[in-house]
Image (cartoon, helix red, strand yellow):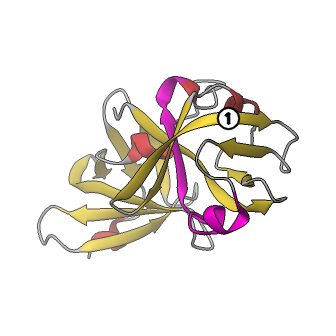
Amino acid sequence: MEPQIAVGRVRRPHGLTGAFKVLSFSGEYEHFAGPKVYRLKNGERFRDFETEWVKISGPATLVKLKGLDTPEQVKAFSNWEIWVDRRFAAPLKDGNEFYCADLIGLKAVCGGIERGEVSAVCLDLPDDTLEITVSESGKKILVPFRSLFIGEVDTEKGTVEISEEWFFE
């Protein structure tokens, strides 16, 4: 497991002091108040910032980071992911929940046979989608994360069940 996890995205500046609105990946916002340091990340680029203040207000939650003091400075980080230590992520509510980051690396099993490995989770498509690298060919396939195609997800065993063989043809 990664020690840090993406919890949201920088949306847009708010006001003139460098505060910004956040998009929460979990739909919860209370956990934004805990971290003392936020890592803003865009691909391989990242920058760490100390937290100055956070105002929790659901989808209108505001964050102010030290060193971002103008709307123009914030705009440079718009749409960057917000990463924090895993302990600050929204808590899982039951055994059927997991973080998207924990799906990466799971073995894709179809009909009891290991067929590949989850290499990415795409959240910006019409459906959340697993990218799976097929063991035999090395090609990448996309499987919508819907009950029609995805069976049991077992992060303890490190597997995700793909219910349709035709994905691998």
> In this picture, which residue range is highlighted in magenta?
70-87
Residue 82 drawn at (x, y percent):
55, 48
Residue at image location 45% in from the left, 40% down from the top = 153
21 vs 144: above or below: above
Mark 1 neighbour density, 10 Å: few (under 14) some (14–19) many (20 or more):
some
Q: Nearer the viewer, residue 32 or 50?
A: 50
Quarter that holds the C terminus: bottom left
For disc 1, the marked residue is 52
Residue type highlighted by circle 1: Glu
Q: Secondary structure at mark 1?
A: strand
Residue 68 drawn at (x, y percent):
62, 52
Residue at image location 65% in from the left, 25% down from the top = 34
Quarter that holds the N terminus: top left
Residue furthest to the left: 136
Q: Nearer the viewer, residue 139 or 63?
A: 63
Q: Is residue 78 magenta?
A: yes
Residue 136 drawn at (x, y percent):
11, 66
Q: Is residue 162 magenta?
A: no
Residue at image location 70% in from the left, 54% down from the top = 23
168 vs 153: above or below: below
User: Image quadrant of residue 66?
Assistant: top right
Residue 59 drawn at (x, y percent):
83, 50
